[in-house]
Image (cartoon, rainbow, N blue to C red):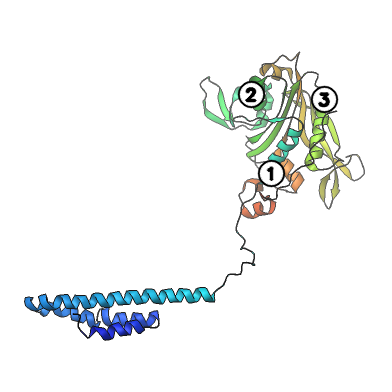
């Protein structure tokens, strides 16, 4: 039988109204100096006979009181939780708290816009390696080792050559994709090649890594008129303005002949350039935007095609520059700083991305 002096402790435990009161009872009975702990300590001074008789009873007392405290604590905690649930309510009509969310980088957004526009004109997207060999990046594009144009590219070269003894480098433009596409797919061909390119240059309008998009059309009977219509149609769709006016100026690129720089008309508004209208009108001007031209015969030959049968045009423009012009950015370096405040301001929500749903016209 459990000793009768256990009953008052059990009664107090059962009547404990709060967790604090129950903790006080635990300390007074089972604490380091508690009454039951003190009783357990007396076992050491007892004889073996007394210990065999009283030991089980004392341990039973401690176990009974400890179990009662545990049960009462669980009951009080359950009662406290029930009271809190009945007291606290959740207003489901309130808006959910704002959660941090990512955004689409302006470069990615412009890449998607480019693909959408040119897809309407029948262009496919082509890709190539960013670590390129010297032949695809320069030689096949009519830029041999002695050509001065190589000095203009500020190239990042690798110390080791490939298995064929060719120098390896970070591509300086996406033009090598033109060669790879001609060799792989032949003609006719209509592609754009967006991607990252690398040059040793850094200021407000240049970074060591930036983005370009190349366009290439190879077919029979291609001429500069096709090039002008393609660029004009593209720029009108991209900038979503019908008053885009282009000016083609003679220029030089080793991979095109003839070559032309393409200028676009703009007007000044609030100190900023706004594209649209003729650059010759009062208060207007011309902005150089991209380079282009008819594909050089040597480049067509390097692509495995007969230049007497196939002709084509090519153009190239900086994706980052297009983004800056369309969305009002003034420093190219901010594109790659990783500043979340800049990204939050200029980025696009993945759930509310602007699209060019109107599409573009078809060739006449």
Q: Is residue 299 above or below residue 83?
A: above
Residue 271 in the image, given as x and y percentages of width and height: 82, 51
> Can residue 144 be seen here?
no
User: Mark 2 Cα within 10 Å, few/some/many (few <14, many 20+)?
Assistant: some
- What's the distance in space between the residues labelled 3 and 1, CA to CA? 29 Å
Q: Residue at x 16, y 75 (%)?
A: 56
Q: Residue furthest front?
A: 1
Q: Secondary structure at mark 3?
A: helix
In this image, 147 relative to 132: left or right? right
- What's the distance in space between the residues labelled 1 and 2, CA to CA? 26 Å
In this image, 66 relative to 299: left or right? left
User: Mark 3 Cα within 10 Å, few/some/many (few <14, many 20+)?
Assistant: some
Identify the mark at residue 23; answer none if there is no mark.
none
In this image, 130 relative to 192: left or right? left
Residue matched to label 3: 224
User: Mark 1 touching mark 2, by CB under 8 A?
Assistant: no
Of pointers 3 and 1, the one earlier in the residue sequence: 1
């Amino acid at each position: 039988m459990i000793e009768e002096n256990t009953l008052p402790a059990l009664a107090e435990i059962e009547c404990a109204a709060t967790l604090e009161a129950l903790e006080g009872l635990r300390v007074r009975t089972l604490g380091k100096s508690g009454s039951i702990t003190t009783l357990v300590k007396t076992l050491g001074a007892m004889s073996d006979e007394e210990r065999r008789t009283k030991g089980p009873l004392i341990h039973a007392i401690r176990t009974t009181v400890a179990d009662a405290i545990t049960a009462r604590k669980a009951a009080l905690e359950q009662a406290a939780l029930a009271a809190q649930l009945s007291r606290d309510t959740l207003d489901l009509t309130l808006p959910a708290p704002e959660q941090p969310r990512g955004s689409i980088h302006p470069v990615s957004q412009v890449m998607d816009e480019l693909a959408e526009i040119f897809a309407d004109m029948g262009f496919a997207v082509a890709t190539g390696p960013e670590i390129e060999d010297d032949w695809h990046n320069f030689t096949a594009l009519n830029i041999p080792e002695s050509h001065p144009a190589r000095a203009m590219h500020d190239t990042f070269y690798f110390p080791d050559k490939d298995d064929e003894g060719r120098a390896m480098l970070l591509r300086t433009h996406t033009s090598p994709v033109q060669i790879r596409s001609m060799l792989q797919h032949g003609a006719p061909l209509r592609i754009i090649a967006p991607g990252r390119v690398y040059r040793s240059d850094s200021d407000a309008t240049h970074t060591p890594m930036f983005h370009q998009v190349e366009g290439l059309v190879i077919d029979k009977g291609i001429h500069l008129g096709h090039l002008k219509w393609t660029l004009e149609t593209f720029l009108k769709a991209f900038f979503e303005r019908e008053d885009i006016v282009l000016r083609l100026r003679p220029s030089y690129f080793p991979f095109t002949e003839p070559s032309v720089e393409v200028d676009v008309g703009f007007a000044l508004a609030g100190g900023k350039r706004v594209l649209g209208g003729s650059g010759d009108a009062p208060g207007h001007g011309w902005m150089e935007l991209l380079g282009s031209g008819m594909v050089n015969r040597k480049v067509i030959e390097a692509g495995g095609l007969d230049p007497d049968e196939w002709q084509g045009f090519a153009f190239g423009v900086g994706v980052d520059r297009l983004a800056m012009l369309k969305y009002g950015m003034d420093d190219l370096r901010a594109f790659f700083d990783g500043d979340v405040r800049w990204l939050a301001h200029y980025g696009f929500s993945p759930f509310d991305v602007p699209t060019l749903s109107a599409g573009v016209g078809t060739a006449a």
